[in-house]
Image: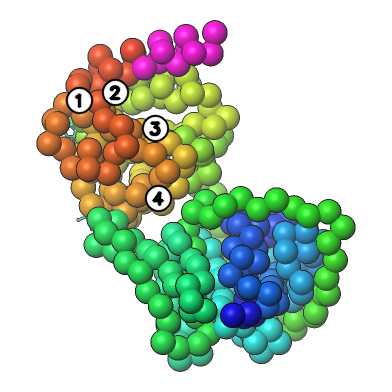
């Protein structure tokens, strides 16, 4: 059944965020012939419209007011509501980013409807929207349908097919109002320290846990990431290892850390506690290296190696180097 879908988009350096491109691909699939719109806010909103058309949007609801470049919930929620009035969507898609986590529940509350957060699968089944999201800290997947409309859905990054841009696509730009006054004052912004590829953007994440035994164990984990190539591999950590001061908290994966969805997640000396799995259960493949064959991580792993990481990892690095030769 055809339905209008509205994406609340995000911009990075004047272009669509990768997560927004992913949402536009998803919107095109579930609209089933209905209209796909995207709300873009910030100085480069209209300039990004051609890119949005190429990824499937028919309409871009844009405000080029640079005030929106800094996310303030009250201003963004008002703009998103204005876009809702124009687009009349049955489904609203947001990314499970800081913006989406904040806006999704606010929009749902204002529309007296439901929000499903952090969804991994979003599909139309028999004319009804059906979403699947992790529950019980990532130990189970729960599937929901909506009893109210519009459905508000936030979607985990990299959980959807990467869309391909169409050439020559065109659409309509509809103006949204400039930002009103905000009750929020942003006093300062500090970028998290972190060099190179961010753990949530990496195609391969190699993570170490308390089983490394000492901070020096992370040098071996880093060597494995180097062997994969630092253009695609990043190093993560369990909370236990971060709490011990072995690795920076910025690299923590899990419920209270980063949520990653890489193609490959290598868990080294990590037991697989539910709070850790909440951050990596969206990985396409999990490889676990653990001394304890009963460790919970093996339940989620596609491939498991039972052994001491100090013996296993050097052998893996050699094998990777040999494969590259
Ligand atoms: C509210 C809350 C939020 C939390 N949020 C997070 C979170 O975001 N992320 C997170 O990770 N945790 C989180 N936790 C903590 C979580 O419950 C676990 O305590 C933590 O994940 C355990 O980390 P670990 O697997 O590194 O350590 P452990 O559970 O101690 O596991 C170490 C593993 O290493 C193996 N091992 C030991 N030596 C070797 C060796 N030489 N070679 C190979 N394997 C070896 C052991 O067999 C064991 O399985 C949270 C907890 C709470 C209560």
Q: Which residue is mark 2?
A: 217
Residue 2 appears in the figure: yes
Labels 3 and 4: the sequence-earlier one: 3
Going from N to C along the chain, the mark reached first, 1 or 3, is: 3
Q: Secondary structure at mark 2?
A: helix
Question: Residue 208: percent from the left, percent from the top?
Answer: 31, 32
> At which x and y percent is residue 153?
49, 72
Q: Are marks 3 and 4 in contact (CB under 8 Å)?
A: no
* Residue under numbered circle 1: 306
What residue is disc 3 on? 206
Label 1: few (<14), some (14–19) or many (≥20) C-alpha neighbours in 10 Å: some
Give the residue pinned by disc 4: 282
Check if mark 1's residue and mark 4's residue have beta carbons within 8 Å: no
Q: Which one is closest to the eye, mark 2 or mark 3?
A: 3
**C-alpha span from label 3 to label 4:** 15 Å
Q: Which mark is first along the chain, 3 or 2?
A: 3
Q: Quadrant of residue 210?
A: top left
**Quadrant in which ligand 1 is drawn:** top left
How far apart are the two marked residues, 1 and 3, measured between alpha carbons? 17 Å
Residue 100 seen by the camera: no
Q: Secondary structure at mark 1?
A: strand
């Amino acid at each position: 059944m055809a339905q209008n879908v509205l994406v609340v988009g995000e911009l990075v350096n004047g272009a669509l965020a990768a997560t927004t491109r992913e949402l536009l691909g998803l919107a095109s699939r579930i609209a089933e012939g209905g209209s796909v719109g995207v709300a873009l806010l910030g100085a480069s909103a209209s300039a990004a419209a051609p890119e949005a058309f190429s990824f499937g949007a028919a309409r871009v609801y844009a405000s080029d007011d640079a005030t929106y470049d800094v996310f303030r919930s009250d201003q963004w929620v008002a703009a998103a509501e204005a876009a809702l009035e124009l687009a009349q969507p049955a489904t609203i898609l947001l990314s499970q980013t800081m913006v989406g986590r904040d806006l999704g529940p606010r929009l749902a509350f204002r529309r007296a409807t439901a929000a499903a957060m952090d969804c991994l699968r979003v599909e139309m089944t028999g004319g009804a929207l059906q979403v699947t999201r992790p529950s019980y800290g990532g130990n189970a997947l729960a599937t929901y349908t909506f009893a109210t409309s519009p459905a508000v859905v936030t979607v985990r990054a990299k959980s959807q097919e990467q869309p391909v841009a169409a050439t020559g696509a065109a659409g309509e730009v509809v103006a949204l109002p400039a930002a009103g006054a905000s009750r929020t004052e942003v006093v300062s912004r500090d970028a998290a320290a972190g060099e190179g590829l961010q753990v949530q953007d990496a195609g391969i994440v190699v993570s170490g846990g308390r089983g490394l035994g000492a901070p020096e164990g992370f040098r071996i984990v880093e060597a494995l990431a180097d062997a994969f190539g630092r253009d695609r591999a990043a190093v993560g950590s369990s909370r236990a290892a971060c709490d011990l001061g072995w690795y920076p908290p910025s690299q923590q994966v899990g419920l209270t850390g980063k949520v990653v969805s890489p193609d490959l997640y290598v868990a080294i000396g990590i037991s697989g506690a539910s709070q850790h799995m909440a951050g990596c259960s969206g990985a396409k493949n999990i490889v676990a290296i653990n001394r304890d064959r009963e460790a919970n991580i093996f339940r989620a792993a596609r491939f498991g190696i039972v052994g001491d990481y100090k013996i296993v990892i050097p052998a893996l690095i050699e094998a990777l180097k040999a494969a590259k030769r």
